[in-house]
């Protein structure tokens, strides 16, 4: 059991390192794209002025954002037992999102664009949260990076695609959700990517069979939205 626990901890570290490397690659790729665009041609002052005037004429007012209440009831399952608890709206200190967080969990910023929500009674059980604006990254890149990370820690076996809709993020504004998971003697590592408004959200859940809080983390993750 001790070896299994150490293995599980090592997997968490491995995914952290993979995420950091891939984040650097994505950032470098974005800068390269910007440079290419900048060098592709020249625009005259008159053309720029005309474009600006056209944008001014066609610009529509931004839709009003619905105010989120300070608390919300969340329902989730543990070993097929239904639970319902009150979650509090919590802002990330590191990223541009807020989330309804259940009591007994702590939201901690780890590095730019990466937070973790830890289960207070067992810090080895947690969910990593990464968000990025659609203006700064492509959904396909984030999705493929997630799949590669889960595959890298699967140790000699293929990760399993999550097909059941109830095991994927659901809710208003959520689209293009996809997930993969891999299981071990001690527990499960699940990776998910989805779009919510102008955000691309990536979740990585580290769960243990003795705790089984994947659904609780999922229900919290579904409430992620841009800060108001």
Image: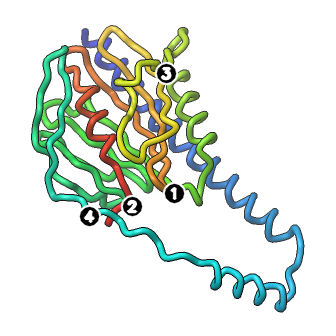
> Up-down: is 174 above or below 226?
above
Give the label on residue 102, or none: none
- Counting residues from the N terminus, which is met first, the one under dot 4 or under dot 1? 4
Location of residue 84 in the rendering, given as x and y in whole percent from the top left corner: 11, 33
| Image position of 117 (left or right of 178) | left
Given residues 82 and 101, the one toward you in this image is 82
Location of residue 83 in the rendering, given as x and y in whole percent from the top left corner: 12, 27
> Up-down: is 94 above or below 20?
below
Question: Mark 2 — residue?
Answer: 96
Pointers 2 and 1 in contact (C-beta within 8 Å): yes
- Counting residues from the N terminus, which is met first, the one under dot 2 or under dot 1? 2
Of tags 4 and 1, the one toward the viewer is 4
Given residues 172 and 129, the one toward you in this image is 172
Quarter holding the C terminus is bottom left
Quarter holding the N terminus is top left
Question: Mark 4 — residue?
Answer: 67
- Counting residues from the N terminus, which is met first, the one under dot 2 or under dot 4? 4
């Amino acid at each position: 059991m001790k070896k299994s626990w150490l293995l599980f901890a090592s997997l968490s570290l491995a995914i952290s390192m993979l995420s950091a490397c891939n984040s650097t690659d994505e950032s470098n790729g974005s800068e390269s794209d910007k440079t290419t665009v900048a060098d592709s041609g020249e625009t005259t002052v008159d053309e720029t002025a005309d474009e600006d005037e056209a944008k001014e004429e066609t610009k529509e007012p931004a839709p009003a954002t619905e105010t989120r209440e300070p608390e919300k009831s969340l329902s989730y399952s543990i070993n097929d037992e239904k639970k319902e608890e009150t979650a509090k709206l919590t802002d990330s200190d590191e990223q541009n999102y807020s989330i309804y967080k259940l009591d007994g969990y702590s939201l901690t910023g780890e590095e730019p664009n990466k937070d973790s929500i830890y289960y207070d009674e067992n810090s080895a059980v947690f969910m990593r949260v990464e968000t990025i604006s659609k203006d700064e990254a492509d959904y396909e890149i984030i999705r493929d990076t997630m799949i590669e990370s889960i595959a890298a820690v699967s140790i000699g076996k293929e990760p399993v695609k999550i097909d059941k809709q109830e095991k994927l993020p659901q809710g208003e504004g959520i689209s293009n959700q996809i997930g993969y998971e891999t299981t071990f003697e001690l527990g499960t590592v699940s990776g998910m990517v989805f779009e919510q408004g102008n955000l691309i959200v990536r979740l990585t859940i580290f769960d243990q069979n003795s705790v089984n809080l994947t659904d609780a983390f999922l229900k919290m993750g579904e409430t992620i939205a841009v800060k108001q």
